[in-house]
Image: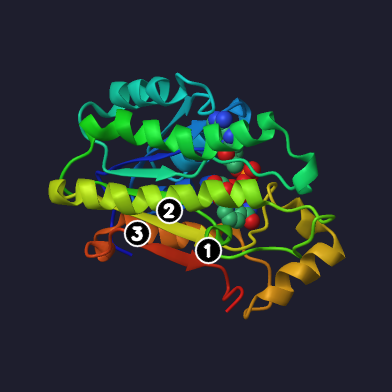
């Protein structure tokens, strides 16, 4: 693994799940971690304590990224710590929702887009003055951006609104990569399949687990660390010639 020693890395939604594993992986590679959280102050502080106990550098930062001011508030806290140079940004914070088409509300739709698309859009805008030659951004997308997950049917719960937020974010990744490439800034997505976190609690039932394994070539549940290791690679100089890509990290789902 190429070292990230001396680099600064912001991870949004770092208190648990994929974000937490990513913060740990980047810290292990030597980066100073800015661990963002929404509400889980205690979990974020325990992550910071864990990283520091292992000889790393970490700070916890808080902002609700679904609010209109959230992205600007977070960027300002980042600036106070790093000054004018942020090397790595991992846009991981997100929410999901499964429901029948008939049951979705306007509020559900707006919450999904505010958190998963508007938040990252304005966070990149606000972080831009701190990004430069050699900086990189990795966005956590989803298998759902390119394929229909679950059993389609008007009476079945579906994640179609969530999936469309991930389609939007992958479109942004290509545009950001094209616009920021000439400044030496790389932008990529990773697209996890089913990963065993709080978000995918359906895997806690035998039927949910069977459904996940049924669409995968590799027959175990994905773990947050499976995604974190790929993000750490994309953040490193080993990935210096990769930009505008979306890397599936899904155990070979829906091949
Ligand atoms: P999770 O629910 O454990 O973590 C989500 C994180 O985002 C939490 O730390 C949460 O506090 C934070 N967050 C949510 N809304 C926020 C807000 N308004 N402001 C600040 N922080 C907020 O889930 P996870 O599985 O670790 O998800 C991480 C990312 O991976 C998400 O973008 C998700 O869409 C994506 N993903 C997950 C899976 C999966 O199967 N778990 C699959 C594909 C993609």
**Residue 170 has which mark?**
2
Coloring applied to the structure: rainbow
Viewer-nearest of labels 1 and 3?
1
Q: Earlier in the sequence, mark 1 or mark 3?
A: 1
Q: Residues within 10 Å of mark 2 (few under 14, many from 20)?
A: many
- Disc 2 within 8 angstroms of ligand 1 (CB): no
Relative to 253, 141 lies left or right: left
- Can residue 202 be spotted in the picture? yes
User: Where on the picture, by quarter, is residue 95?
Assistant: top right
Do tag 1 and tag 3 residues touch (Cβ < 8 Å)?
no
Viewer-nearest of labels 2 and 3?
2
Q: Which residue is mark 1?
A: 146
**CA distance separating discs 1 and 3:** 20 Å
Relative to 211, 239 lies left or right: left
> Which quarter of the figure is the C terminus placed in?
bottom right
Q: Earlier in the sequence, mark 2 or mark 3?
A: 2
**CA distance separating discs 2 and 1:** 9 Å
User: Where on the picture, by quarter, is residue 69?
Assistant: top left
Q: Which residue is mark 3?
A: 234
Picture quarter with ligand 1 = top right
Q: Would you place residue 124 above or below residue 72 in this image?
A: below
Residue 52: x %, y % from top left: 44, 38
Q: Would you place residue 79 above or below residue 174 in this image?
A: above
> Could you say whether the residue bearing mark 3 is in a helix, strand or loop?
helix
């Amino acid at each position: 693994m190429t070292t990230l020693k001396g680099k600064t890395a912001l991870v949004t939604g770092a208190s648990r799940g994929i974000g937490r594993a990513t913060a740990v992986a980047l810290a292990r590679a030597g980066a100073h971690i800015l661990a963002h959280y929404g509400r889980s102050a205690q979990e974020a502080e325990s992550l910071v304590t864990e990283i520091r106990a292992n000889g790393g550098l970490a700070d916890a930062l808080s902002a609700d990224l679904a609010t209109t001011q959230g992205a600007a508030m977070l960027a300002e806290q980042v600036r106070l710590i790093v000054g004018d140079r942020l090397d790595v940004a991992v846009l991981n914070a997100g929410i999901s929702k499964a429901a029948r088409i008939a049951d979705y509300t306007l509020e559900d739709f707006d919450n999904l887009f505010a958190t998963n698309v508007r938040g990252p859009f304005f966070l990149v805008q606000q972080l831009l003055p701190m990004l430069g030659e050699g900086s990189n951004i990795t966005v956590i997308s989803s298998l759902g951006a390119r394929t229909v997950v679950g059993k389609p049917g008007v009476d079945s719960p579906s994640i179609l609104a969530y999936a469309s937020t991930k389609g939007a974010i992958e479109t942004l990744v290509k545009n950001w990569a094209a616009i920021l490439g000439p400044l030496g800034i790389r932008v990529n997505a990773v697209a996890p399949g089913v990963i065993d976190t709080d978000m995918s609690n359906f895997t806690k039932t035998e039927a949910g687990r069977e459904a996940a394994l049924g669409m995968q070539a590799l027959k175990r549940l994905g773990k947050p660390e499976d995604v974190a290791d790929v993000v750490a690679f994309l953040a490193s100089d080993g990935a210096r010639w990769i930009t505008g890509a979306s890397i599936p990290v899904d155990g070979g789902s829906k091949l």
